[in-house]
Amino acid sequence: MFTVMGVNNQTFLFSSSCRRDGEPPLIKGWIPIIGKALEFGKDAHKFLEKHKEKYGDVFTVQIAGKYMTFIMDPLLYPNIIKHGRQLDFHEFSNRVAPFTFGYPPVTGKYPGLREEIRRSFHLLQGDGLIALTESMMGNLMLVFRQDHLAERPGEEGSWKSGNIYQFCFTVLFEATFLTLYGKPPAARRHSGMGVLREDFIKFDKMFPLLIAQIPIWLLGRTKAIRENLIRCFLPHRMSIWSNKSQFIRRRSEVFDQYDTLRDFDKAAHHFAILWASLGNTVPATFWTMYYLVSHPEALEVVRQEIHDVLRTNGVEFSRDRDVTISRELLDKLLYLESSINESLRLSSASMNIRVAQEDFDLQLDSERSVPVRKGDIIALYPQSMHLDPEIYEEPQTFQFDRYTQDSKKKTDFYKDGEKLKYYLMPFGSGSSKCPGRYFAINEIKQFLCLLLLYFDLQLEEGQTRATVDSSRAGLGILLPTTDIRFRYRLRVNQD
């Protein structure tokens, strides 16, 4: 998913002046500067819910030297999100993304570059998404066909074992790479993909610390690993790859317009897109696959839906032939989409932040407002909404059809008897909403369609259920604390 969906709990270091009348309750820690950072980082959801019960829906927390005002009532979200001019997300992203991915800030000596980069993201939507979806389908089939669908003599119908997260990551990493950046000359797949994956995993483990702006020289070999990843995208290497996406071609054209932008800097931008396209998509795919496989009845409903949609639309399926599922057909898979949304609800821990650009009174509702000073941080933490039992019955339980009603998408969710405008927010909000969210959801749908069409799936016995690792709270989709073992085998053809 193409943007960092939130912010780590150590990103900005703002000093505080004296509190003023009308400002929300302030929660400080015993240790100066650190404040409540350690308690917040240990379990952000529990921390915020505890203080919401004590202080109400609006309060300020001192975290790592800054003061963050949390808006906990989802009915107030629209009033925060609409202040796009006064409450800006880009101050955060413009500062932290260059630091994390190793390219220079896009402002200053590169006039117009930031705007051109933003415009390029439109190619991930509309007609651009149709071409991306078609390409991704072909590349997923390529990886599945060569790595998992071929059976050696004597293996017919036998079970194979694997780890769910590793399986998702390996398939999606290569298929996404091929879809965005293209193929090598005279080959269908890039060599050295395994080494690239391993370096990506090592970098990804350090990602929260980089987002927190911990100097990279304190993080062991992370700088060398990042440089290895960036060099994969140097222009002289990418120039010989064919079938690049229009999105990457356009970005390359934009970078070439700036003579002062070094080849290494251009490559670093391309690497950032690789991380953005996988960093949250892979764990989101893991959780959906895990929940479906651990709920066999739900899995069978979704599998049957896929077969029914293909059959109704004249698409014949056989495990011996590649299948193509268009974007139009993907949009008809209501139970699959609901399963994905339910998995996102249970695993997403993004934080939507805004930095005040001026002093003003933030109107929360018709009766309440709070004074906001330039530089203040306003934060929404949607996980509290996603796990609210008033909004979602049995919120800790996976219900694959939670977002369907009468064979349609369900969009009516309520708080205090009032319909929520925002009820599911794994992709951010407003101007910071992930521009690649449609591509990401399509990737997950395509991967799961192929998985359910071609394979029988079971969890291996003797395992505890998967739990979320909260160390990335605030940054998007949480990873599992441990991988989960599963078994898979080719299915016989189904009518």
Image (cartoon, rainbow, N blue to C red):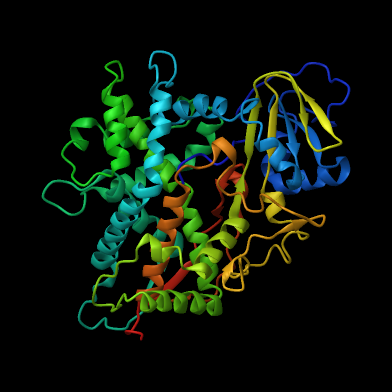
Where does residue 167 sit, x and y in percent of width and height? 39, 61
Res 338 → quadrant: bottom right
Where does residue 437 sit, x and y in percent of width and height? 48, 48
Is there any visible trace of residue 402 in the rendered image?
A: yes
Tell me the residue at 51%/64% (across/down): 337
Is there any visible trace of residue 27 in the rendered image?
A: no
From what the image shows, is residue 283 above or below residue 445? above
From what the image shows, is residue 419 above or below residue 232? below
Of 177 and 215, nearer the camera is: 177
Where does residue 445 sit, x and y in percent of width and height? 43, 62
Q: Residue furthest top?
A: 109
Tell me the residue at 89%/22% (across/down): 21
Res 102 → quadrant: top left
Tell me the residue at 38%/60% (across/down): 327
Q: Is residue 100 left or right of residue 396?
A: left
Tell me the residue at 68%/60% (across/down): 412
